[in-house]
Amino acid sequence: MAREIWKPGNFIYPVPAVLVSCQDRDGRMNLFTAAWTGTVCTNPPMAYVSVRPERYSYPMLRETGAFVLNLTTVSMARAVDYCGVKSGRDVDKWKETGLTPGKASSVEAPVVLESPVNVECQVTEVKELGSHHMFLAEVRAVQVDGEYLDRNGKFHLEKAGLLAYSHGAYYGLGEVLGTFGYSIRKKATKPAKNKKKTSRKPG
């Protein structure tokens, strides 16, 4: 079948469905769902979130320059959707979803305690790009849920059941297909078994 050419648009899927938490100078907190978010730089660690200026949380981000990217799980899907379609102007999303605000360690914004990972961000620059303004931020701290730490301190995020968003729908991440570098990793070979030498008797 022939390929079709469509008009330009954002069709890079899947993307993370995160809950962004923030607050104003008076301590009023809000949550909103964002998919236009991700990693920018490793050193220094930086992330971004793109937000429409008309959103209720936009002035909060401008005022404090702080936000938290809270990774979400399959069990949080309904709350994630609710926070994406309801405005903080009209409802208390924390109360309506039953999500619990916690204290960030390094920025002026709450964390979502039900989230397996909270990425605390401090805005360094705002790029007014068009329909969305991109908030570039330095990652100041990361909180992780100890439930996913094994006895050796290794973090198993794959056990959290992370949530993703793709073309208008939410999906749980599937099975692990491989780890980074597995395509070029040499397969372990089993050592050859030592064969016992036997002597043949003449005759």
Image (tube, helix red, strand yellow):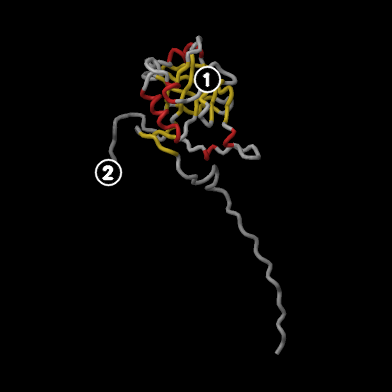
Residue nearest the viewer, comparing 51 with 156: 156
Residue 2's disc number: 2
Residue 47 location in percent, x, y?
51, 25
- Dot 1 falls on a residue whose secondary structure is strand
Tell me the quarter of the picture where residue 179 sits: top right
Could you give the CA–CA distance between mark 2 and mark 1, rounded to whole angstroms? 50 Å
Q: Nearer the viewer, mark 2 or mark 1?
A: 1
Q: Residue at x 27, y 43 (%)?
A: 2
- The three-letter amino acid code for the residue at tag 1 is Pro
First in residue order: circle 2 vs circle 1 = 2
Residue 110's disc number: 1
Using a 10 Å C-alpha cutoff, classify the residue at mark 2 as few (fewer than 14 neighbours), some (14 to 19) or many (20 or more). few
Residue 120's disc number: none
Where is 48 relative to 200, above or below?
above
- The three-letter amino acid code for the residue at tag 2 is Ala
Q: Residue at x 54, y 16 (%)?
A: 108
Q: Residue furthest top?
A: 26
Question: Which quarter of the rendered picture does the C terminus lie within?
Answer: bottom right
